[in-house]
Image (cartoon, helix red, strand yellow):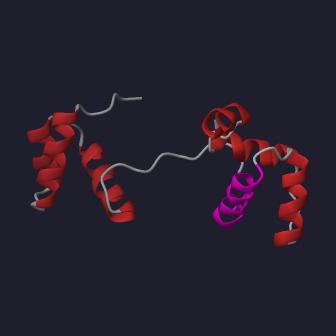
């Protein structure tokens, strides 16, 4: 696999692509392959910018932003709730069941823990 273009060469490639120069001429000026120029143009057409977005890893999120806001607001009211109590509350409110593991992953993602809560409340 070929190494990525240096930042300077990448920026030059982007600028030259905006002038609609032929692929071969751009490749000669940037000192890269015609394939790199073609990928760059393709990414710009697909995504609106020259670099493709990163691939997401891990399982898809099951807690939607609305549910996340509800969890955080409930924890502001009662910061000493257990995760199974949070899951039961969200189940009643949204009529969707979440496991304790899903609640735990969400709370870890927003960096919520009881130590921070106890320090902030003092």
- Residue name at image x 74 percent, y 42 percent: 105
Can you see residue 61? no
Look at the picture and state if 106 lies above or below 19: above
Where does residue 98 sit, x and y in percent of width and height?
86, 56
Q: Is residue 65 magenta?
A: yes
Look at the picture and state if 6 lies above or below 70: above
Question: Magenta: predominant secondary structure element?
Answer: helix
Q: Is residue 24 magenta?
A: no
The one nearer the camera, 31 or 105, is 105
78 displayed left or right of 55: right
101 displayed left or right of 32: right
Residue 86 quadrant: bottom right
Where does residue 94 sit, x and y in percent of width and height?
82, 71
The one nearer the camera, 38 or 90, is 90
The one nearer the camera, 62 or 32, is 62
The one nearer the camera, 117 or 12, is 117
Quarter placement of the C terminus:
top right
Disc count in the image?
Answer: 0
- Residue name at image x 75 percent, y 47 percent: 79
18 displayed left or right of 43: left
85 displayed left or right of 18: right
- Residue name at image x 68 percent, y 59 percent: 73
- Residue name at image x 64 percent, y 42 percent: 109
Please state the extent of the stretch shown in magenta in the rendering: 60-78
Where does residue 44 sit, x and y in percent of width and height?
31, 59
């Amino acid at each position: 696999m070929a190494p990525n273009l240096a930042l300077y060469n990448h920026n030059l490639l982007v600028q030259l692509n905006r002038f609609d120069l032929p692929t071969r001429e751009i490749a000669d000026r940037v000192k890269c392959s015609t394939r790199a120029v073609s990928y760059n143009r393709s990414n710009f057409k697909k995504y609106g910018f020259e670099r493709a977005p990163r691939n997401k890893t891990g399982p898809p999120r099951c807690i939607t932003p609305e549910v996340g806001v509800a969890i955080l607001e409930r924890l502001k009211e009662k910061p000493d709730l257990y995760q199974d109590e949070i899951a039961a509350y969200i189940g009643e409110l949204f009529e969707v069941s979440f496991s304790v593991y899903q609640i735990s992953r969400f709370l870890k993602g927003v960096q919520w823990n009881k130590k921070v809560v106890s320090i902030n409340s003092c």
